[in-house]
Amino acid sequence: GNAKAMGVPTGRKPVTGSIMVSNESRVGHVALVIAVEGNRFKVTEMNYKGFNKVSERWIESDSNAIKGFIYGK
């Protein structure tokens, strides 16, 4: 919501280089989209698999956890 309010493009489609925003924790979660393949996308992120740990994973594009994507200017 804050990104959109500041005029930064947002949407529902994963795009390489965009930021995924999800509800995967009580305060929310963000990750960088590094690949898109069919109906899934790969992210790199911190703290998903433990504090201060960097990890990568594939996510289905229609996951209910996804709130949206921030595309940048």
Image: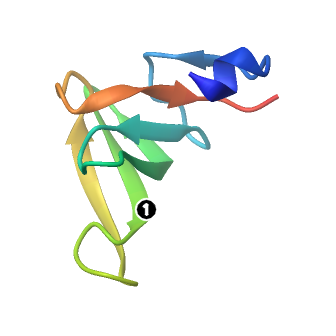
Q: Residue furthest bottom?
A: 52
Of the residues shown, which amino acid type is indicated by label 1?
A: Thr
Q: How many marks?
A: 1
Q: Quadrant of the N terminus?
A: top right
List x then y, in percent, for residue 55.
Answer: 33, 73
Residue 22, quarter of picture: top left
Q: Looking at the image, is 65 positioned above or below residue 44?
A: above
Q: Residue furthest front?
A: 26
Report the residue marked by disc 1. Answer: 44
Residue drawn at 25 percent across, 26 percent down: 39
Q: Secondary structure at mark 1?
A: strand
- Residue closest to the eye, 47 or 41: 47
- Residue closest to the eye, 34 or 32: 32
Residue drawn at 60 percent across, 19 percent down: 10
List x then y, in percent, for residue 64.
Answer: 17, 25
Residue drawn at 27 percent across, 27 percent down: 61
Instruction: Tell me: 70 left or right of 52.
Output: right
Q: Callout 1 environment at 10 Å: few (<14), some (14 to 19), or many (20+)?
A: some
Instruction: Tell me: 10 left or right of 33.
Output: right
List x then y, in percent, for residue 32.
Answer: 51, 51
List x then y, in percent, for residue 37.
Answer: 34, 36
Instruction: Tell me: 59 left or right of 55.
Output: left
Q: Quadrant of the C terminus?
A: top right
Q: Looking at the image, is 35 positioned above or below residue 72?
A: below
Q: Looking at the image, is 72 positioned above or below residue 19?
A: above
Residue 50, quarter of picture: bottom left
